Amino acid sequence: MPKPKTKASENADRVRLIIHDDDDTPRSFVMDLVHTVFKQPKGDVNAITRAIERQGRVSFGPYEPAVAATILKQAQQRIEEARHPLKISSEAAAPTSETGGERCHFCGEPDGDTELNIGGQTRFICGECVETVARAAGFRPGAVEFNYAFELLDRQFGEFEPDHLVSTVRHFPVHMRADLQAALDKLLDRLPLFGVRQHYRYDTVNYAKLCESGDNAYPLAVPQYREIDVGEAAPVRCLENGLWLGTQLGDTKKPGGIERFPFVVVLSPNRDPDEEPSVAVEFTVPDWGAEFVQESFAALESAVSSADAYRGKILSFDGGADYRGRSRGLMVHKLPKVAREDVILPEATTKLLDRNVLRFVESREPLRALGLSTRKGILLYGPPGTGKTHTIRYLASSLAGHTTLIITAAQMALLGHYMTLARLLQPALVVIEDVDLIARDREQMGVCEEPLLNQLLNEMDGLKEDADIIFVLTTNRPEQLESALAGRPGRIDQAIEVPLPDEAGRQKLIRLYGRGLMLEQHVVEEAAQRTSGVSAAFIKELMRRSAQSCIARGDGKTLESHDIADALGDMLFAGGKLNVKLLGGAQEMARVAT
């Protein structure tokens, strides 16, 4: 009685067909042969053809002998008709285990489902050994070796025709890329990520370009990141060019009843010098994956709108506007916090500040419930050096949860960007320093200044939607302000003078800026009497120079009257009238100096 056949004996006579590489057969012919005769998926054809070129041969099968003979005959007929020298041979398939699987070349287990060409021979490796080797070599699980982006995309969308794919792109502000990066990391967590090397400096990468082959093919590269300072201990690493591959559950009612569909995400900064800087995120999916794309963009936009990376910080745009009115990004200012006791102002001025800023913020919700505006316009005016900037730092330190945006006159071309950011990050404190440089009388304006003034007036007048924004404008020359800005409620709600300090204020300033020194009361009183009419900035410099004199005597701790006298001599007399003005001395002192 004949013995029953085992799996191994049943498969012992199966055949593998091998395509051998040569230098003459066109690559396109080999790709077509692999797809149409050997029935390999279109998405795998590129990788298989490259493997033939790299390894010198690739085997197919195993096949039943009759099937192998039919395939071989069809292939050789195609080769002869095309008159190519491509060689195809056959060999007996490796024996399989009793359970029907190919035995792993390394561990011998009957689960060898990954085919490799080792030393010109076909070998099989089980999944566990593949992962072990990959981990030892430092590869990510599931990573596939490719050199060009189009090869990845061919593999990803091999079963889909191009007219069944849809690409959707959205642009995000370049200065919000830290929040965008965090959202992408969360949304695309654990998906294979590849870097892409752009062809030239202003090249913006997109899906259509990445599909190009030949000389225009985009090489894959190590992902490159740019560090963005967001005012924290460590910067945020933001990807330059990125390509993610993934799959997503689909709708089984769609064509073919496909339960999962592939997708590709491309990220690239918009580098076109004639367009507004932005970061482009592009999703490419089969045409029934639109819902997934919209849900993904909604998640990204929600994260960018929350602006967690910059909320509550002190910001300005980096480097000012170029001739196109653009900026290179955001700067986070790490300014020292200013406590209430460090603001040396007349009591009436301090109360005005508290009522019109701090108490106003506390009243916002009741005001909103009454249908009243929650925006405010404050003008701080006074001579140079009296502490307007110091006062703004105090307000920024005191307004918990507010984002402070600092705009200089040189950056007014970016006002629209600042206001978009202020609405995004509200509640916000918008500081416009030296506003008289763009808001002086219209008769004195140039052709470039008036449009900036009109834009400022529109923003402050509430032509756009109401928002929790406080404008704080500063000027050293209030008399030069355009009447449209200074004379209409709703733009400036309260003007607050920051005056030169009186004698009591000068004593407080002397103790504030000399807090590291031992100060006798008679020395403080004498210094205050001798500095009538000076600014806070003058006293700050006076105390630094007095400390220098104290250090030169060898003590460095106890300040004496002659230290103050030596410092005043240099500041008031040695440098002449101009030096007095530069340091913030009174006009009477300047006249004495001359």
Image: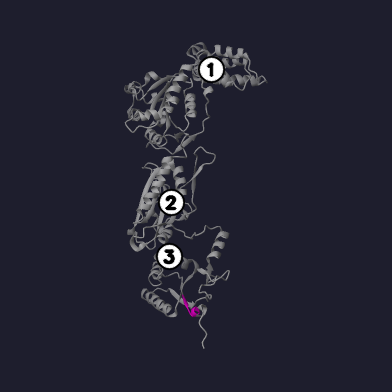
Q: Are marks 2 and 1 in contact (CB under 8 Å)?
A: no
383 or 593, nearer to the observer: 383
Query: Could one spot residue 42 in this view of the protein?
Result: yes
Amino acid carrying label 2: it is Gln
Q: How many angstroms separate mark 3 from mark 2 (CA)? A: 25 Å
Q: Percent position (x, y) of residue 257?
A: 36, 62
Mark carried by residue 44: 3
Q: Is residue 278 visible?
A: no
Whole-Å distance between the Cαs marked 2 and 1? 58 Å
Residue at 56% x, 21% y is 512
Q: Which mark is residue 198?
A: 2
> Mark 3–mark 2 contact, CB under 8 Å?
no
Seen in the picture, residue 425 relative to 186 is either above or below; the reply is above
459 left or right, relative to 91: left
Sooner in the amino-acid sequence: mark 1 or mark 3:
3
Identified by mark 3, the residue type is Asp
Which residue shows up at 55% across the image and 64% down it?
128
Q: Which residue is mark 1?
A: 575
